[in-house]
Amino acid sequence: MVNASGKIRVGIVGMGRTAAFMRPVIAHPHATLAAVCDLDEDLCRAALDRYGVGSPQPAIYTVYENMLQSGRLDAVIIGTPVYAHVPQSILALAENIHVFSEVPATWSLDEAKALVHACRTSQATYMMGENSCYDRSIMTVRNMIADGVFGHIHYAEGEYIHECLSLLAKTPWREKLFALNGLVYTTHEIGPIMSLIGWDRIARLSAIGSGSHFAGKAGQPYVQETRLVMQGQTAQGRLVRVCQDFQSPGTHSHHRYVIQGVNGRFESGYRDFPAQVMAPSIQDEKGSMVWKNLSEFEARYLPDIWKRSEAEAKKHGHGGSDYVLINDY
């Protein structure tokens, strides 16, 4: 939907990390940043200054509902704490305003059902903004899978190891995550894995934890166990494994992926090691199957959106995936 100005008018709520989306919105030829919102007006002004938003300046709001009811938005980007994602998405969808929500979309089944209902009854489009699906390597491997390089994919794994206890002072909403036992922030792993196996739905699921080994401000152990491992089986019989740990100290390994097919394997970069692939079609001069860096296959398999906009994408967050993600939205 494009209004009379010829551009999609976008509003952003939440001036934390999500404020960085100002850049790809402004850079897009068919979009304009029409409004920003945060409970603290000073944070809005600071973010506009930080990301170099010039004239025309977007309208500033401190009440989300007021921004929606201004009647001048086509789309909204929601970057507030997790517990506000679903309520704010539903409000926008009720106004037929397109919604881009930061992850996770929801953290309860009841919220998920309410969100699905709102999407089905709205004329607007909803998108959960999982930037890892738009990672350069993930999108390259997706094209290799489509070309049959690895054969049938029967196994996938992902892990998110990120010590967040030291971040609680700046992001107190994370305390709510630690008050729930389970893998509550797995979209960075599940999203890319699902995209690589053709969205083959997980039909069976189990999870187990290593116990609670850290405590909150009151000295009570966190409800969320320190390390959690989930394994699932898809409707087509694939095995998926995901590991999550937001408490243990150590190297921030962030996101790691493995995709195993009957003919080959992909392993994402880890610490100092680059992303690599192996398959019968990948051989050395002696005809032996060998590991090769994924970058060697980008000339053939890197998606066009990355090739066209790489210089611009590198100016934006998460290695450029934020830019590609917003363009898709």
Image (tube, rainbow, N blue to C red):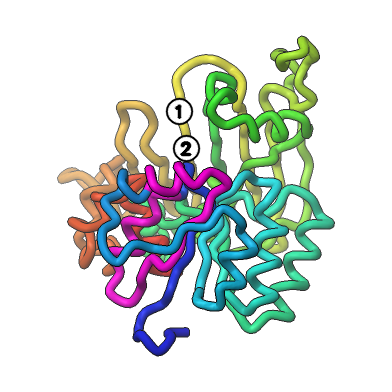
Disc number placed over residue 95 in the picture, else none = none
Q: Residue at x 44, y 48 (%)?
A: 44
Q: Residue at x 70, y 75 (%)?
A: 94
Q: Is residue 146 above or below residue 18?
A: below
Magenta part of the protein: which range? 19-47
User: Is label 1 in contact with label 2 (beta carbons under 8 Å)?
Assistant: yes
> Depth-wise, is mark 1 or mark 2 nearer the camera?
1
Circle 2 crowding by C-alpha within 10 Å: few under 14, some 14–19, many from 20? many
Q: Residue at x 27, y 74 (%)?
A: 29
Percent across and percent down for residue 196 are: 50, 58
Q: Is residue 317 above or below residue 161?
A: below
Is 28 part of what is drawn in magenta? Answer: yes
- Dividing the picture into quadrants, the one containing residue 10 is bottom left
Label 2 sits on residue: 256
The quadrant the C terminus occupies is bottom left
Q: Is residue 329 above or below residue 311?
A: below
Is 201 in front, or is 56? 56
Residue 317 seen in this snapshot: yes
Circle 1 crowding by C-alpha within 10 Å: few under 14, some 14–19, many from 20? some
Is 131 in front, or is 97? 97
Could you tell me the amino acid type at mark 1? Answer: Ser
Percent across and percent down for residue 17 are: 45, 43
Alpha carbons under labels 1 and 2: distance apart: 7 Å
Residue 17 seen in this snapshot: no
Percent across and percent down for residue 25 are: 36, 63
Q: What SS does tag 2 mark?
A: strand
**View extreme (left): residue:** 285
Label 1 sits on residue: 253
- Dividing the picture into quadrants, the one containing residue 157 is top right
Could you tell me the amino acid type at mark 2? Answer: Arg
Is 72 in front, or is 253? 72
Left or right: 76 in relation to 106: left
